[in-house]
Amino acid sequence: MVNSQSSIVNGQAPRIIISGGGTGGHIFPAVSIANAIKELRPNSEILFVGAEGRMEMQRVPDAGYRIIGLPIAGFDRKHLWKNFAVLVKIVRSQWKARTIIKKFNPDIAVGVGGYASGPLLKTASMMNIPTLLQEQNSYAGVTNKLLAKKAKKICVAYEGMEKFFPSDKIILTGNPVRQNLLANKYTKTEALQAFGFNTNKKTILILGGSLGARTINQTLMDAIMTIQANPDIQFIWQTGKIYIDEVRQKLEQAIHGQCANLFVTDFIKEMDKAYAAADLVISRAGAGSISEFCLLEKPVILVPSPNVAEDHQTKNALALANKDAAIYVKDAEAHDQLIPIALQTVKDDDKLAALRENIAKLALPDSAKIIANEVLKLIGK
């Protein structure tokens, strides 16, 4: 065992490793947990461990925390023969994880999901460091299922997770979200004015993720004339950086780039402003995004990505749609159905009100603080 006595018990600063990443959906909750720990115990020392070359290597330092990358990669489920190199990277990552743990001497290791957390949490358990897992999705990921046996506590965002994890370890906490989204800094009028929009018209926010969602973006590109033909509805369209040039070219060809009811950008930095402006959201069904919609009480049409492990986004979407808390559109059917459903929904005040009411019931506030308390309690033990 690396540390013979916990930092909280002996009065020293708690030392915590938070590991995971690969996508923004893992990074934002991890940073929120770290911030909550710092609020409760300002002297805490926190180290992040992620995957080399992934976005956490930039986003975590931007948030003010130190991060070390592991030479880890995810399995290629379509080309199994390519996974020999992945196995080599796993072994190398476990050796590096052991070195990190011995040097940092943590009181606890927290895993937030994604393949980056596997080697670190497994190695921590082998070295008798207590571990806590955070599972964001309604269908548990492979990494967390493998790590659950040794974990002390497992924080989940959905009910019914006993089918994946031991029931005595589960705590229903919800998913931490970006704290700045909950500050309510902008009124709807202020937000709409910032986008150059009419403050009396309905507005749809389309989120293609930080990189982009091909189906959503292709659907919108093919619907430019329909958007222009509905001037009473306004559209804020985040394309993601991969698709922005293609979208701008399409706009130029179709309408010479001029469309008064359409705002297009590759990335929205002030998401709180975009949410404040929106009457309806169109989005993929990542767990972090869904948690934001619940807390902000946003009516949403979910188009789950079919290109994720265990098709977990579809399961996330159905968890809401089955409670009439969101509208579910299959990726394969989005091209024909998405825009007609969106236009019909945004004009239906009763439908919007019902979606707002039902999604609000699923919100779990203070998730980051609840998880932070569990982390500190485990150190205390």
Image (cartoon, rainbow, N blue to C red):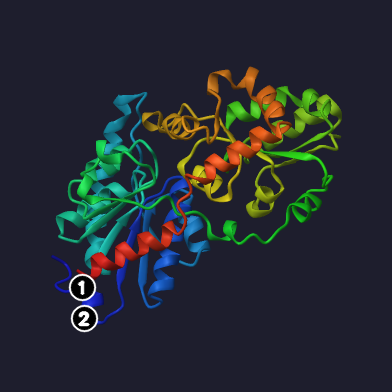
Classify residue 159 by image quadrant: top left
- Whether residue 236 sits left or right of residue 57 in the image: it is right
Element class at badge 2: helix
Q: Are marks 1 and 2 in contact (CB under 8 Å)?
A: yes
Identity of the amino acid at label 1? Ser
Mark 2 residue type: Asn
* Picture layout, residue 27 above or below residue 280: below
- Crowdedness near tag 1: few (<14), some (14–19) or many (≥20) residues, C-alpha within 10 Å: some
What is the x, y in percent for residue 234?
78, 37
Is residue 207 among the parts visible in the rendering? Answer: no
Locate the C terminus and report the quarter of the image it occupies: bottom left
Residue that numbered label 1 is attached to = 6
Q: Position of residue 71 (x, y in %)?
A: 34, 48
Please determine whether, in this image, residue 46 is positioned above or below residue 205: below
Query: Badge 2: how crowded within 10 Å, few (<14), some, or many (20+)?
Result: few
Residue carrying label 2: 10
Q: Is residue 195 visible?
A: yes
- In the drawing, does residue 260 fall left or right of residue 218? right
Q: Quadrant of residue 246?
A: top right
Compute the Cα span from label 1 to label 2.
Answer: 6 Å
- Where is residue 274? Give x, y as percent: 68, 49
Whole-percent x, y for residue 138 in the image? 38, 38
Q: Nearer the viewer, residue 240 or 85?
A: 240
Q: Quadrant of the N terminus?
A: bottom left
User: Of 208 and 193, which appears nearest the observer?
Assistant: 193
Q: Which mark is residue 67?
A: none
